[in-house]
Image (tube, grey):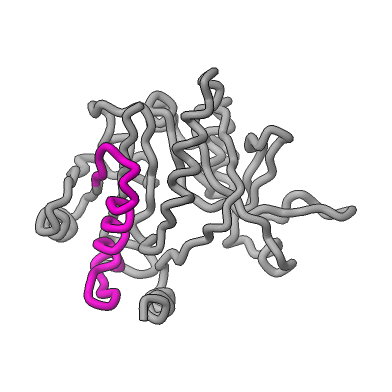
């Protein structure tokens, strides 16, 4: 099984433009993410897919493999799909460029899900973590997921799901995706779907297409860097 990681790296982030090239204690955010993925030793290849001259030059200076996007994309998975369209790969993992603390175990668990799937029943896999407090359940910026008894995703929402009429457990979606290559290319070929557009959650497109998405429990939350304040918190964690 040939396994490839692709880091989609757009320069013009809406809330924090240029964040991937921001300094994080002596290295850029993107460099720390890229090196963390490479150092897991889980992948046959690691690529950065970008639309930016600056990011392309930066990755080349690191000795990394960079794919220059030709098309404009409205989500990272589409940029990853353009990158791997003609690549020899069985499983493709989309790792966000602003995740410098990406955990080796989280990525290994995603890969193992495909190795265990001898019947090839699943199309993609992602991660979920229990939500401990009511504020997070009600926060629309935190995407929730519900799954069936086999751990397969039923729905994602920014609303509180499930509705807690009785005692239960809510789960947060951790947005790292592992795709079979064919499933990723199917996603890429499909225009955004109605519920995806309503919720602004790209994972829903896979469900509306009838794809089987395996959710894996994790204790990895990550420290995504969406604002300058997030960057300062990340600096403190590195020390």
Name, please, the residue furthest toward the top. Answer: 119
For this view, does 153 lie left or right of residue 200?
right
Marker count (numbered): 0
Residue toward you, 73 or 149: 149
**Which portion, as a residue range, is magenta?**
19-47
Give the x, y percent position of residue 189: 39, 27
Residue at screen point 36% across, 63% down: 100
Residue 207 percent coordinates (x, y): 58, 33
Please check the rendered image and state whether residue 23 is part of the magenta-colored stretch, yes or no: yes
For residue 119, which quarter of the picture?
A: top right
Q: Nearer the viewer, residue 218 or 80?
A: 218
Q: Is residue 133 magenta?
A: no
Percent position of residue 93, x then y: 39, 41
Image point 52% across, 58% down: which residue? 220
Q: Where is residue 52 shown, x and y percent of the image? A: 19, 55
- Vertical placement of residue 160 versus 72, above or below: below
Above or below, 229 relative to 62: below
In the displayed structure, does residue 184 sit left or right of residue 60? Answer: right
Residue drawn at (53%, 60%) of the image: 221
- Who's the residue at 31% across and 46% down the image? 41
Q: Where the N terminus falls, by quadrant?
A: top left
- Specify the quadrant that holds the C terminus: bottom left
- Left or right: where 239 falls relative to 173: left
């Amino acid at each position: 099984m040939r396994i490839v990681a692709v880091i989609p790296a757009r320069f013009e982030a809406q809330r924090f433009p240029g964040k991937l090239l921001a300094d994080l204690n002596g290295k850029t955010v993107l460099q720390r993410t890229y090196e963390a993925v490479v150092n897991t030793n889980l992948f046959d290849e690691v690529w950065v897919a970008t639309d930016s001259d600056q990011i392309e030059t930066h990755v080349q200076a690191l000795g990394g493999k960079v794919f220059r996007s030709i098309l404009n994309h409205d989500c990272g998975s589409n940029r990853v799909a353009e990158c791997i369209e003609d690549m020899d790969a069985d499983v493709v993992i989309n790792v966000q460029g602003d995740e410098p603390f990406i955990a080796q175990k989280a990525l290994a668990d995603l890969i193992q899900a495909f190795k265990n799937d001898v019947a090839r029943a699943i199309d993609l896999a992602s991660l979920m973590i229990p939500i401990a407090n009511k504020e997070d359940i009600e926060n629309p910026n935190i995407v929730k997921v519900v799954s069936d008894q086999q751990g397969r995703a039923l729905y994602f929402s920014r609303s509180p799901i499930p509705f807690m009429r009785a005692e239960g457990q809510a789960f947060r979606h951790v947005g790292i995706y592992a795709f079979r290559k064919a499933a990723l290319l199917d996603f890429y070929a499909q225009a955004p779907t109605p519920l995806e557009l309503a919720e602004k959650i790209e994972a829903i497109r896979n469900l509306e297409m009838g794809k089987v998405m395996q959710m894996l429990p994790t204790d990895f939350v990550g420290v995504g860097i969406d604002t300058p304040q997030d960057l300062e918190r990340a600096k403190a964690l590195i020390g």
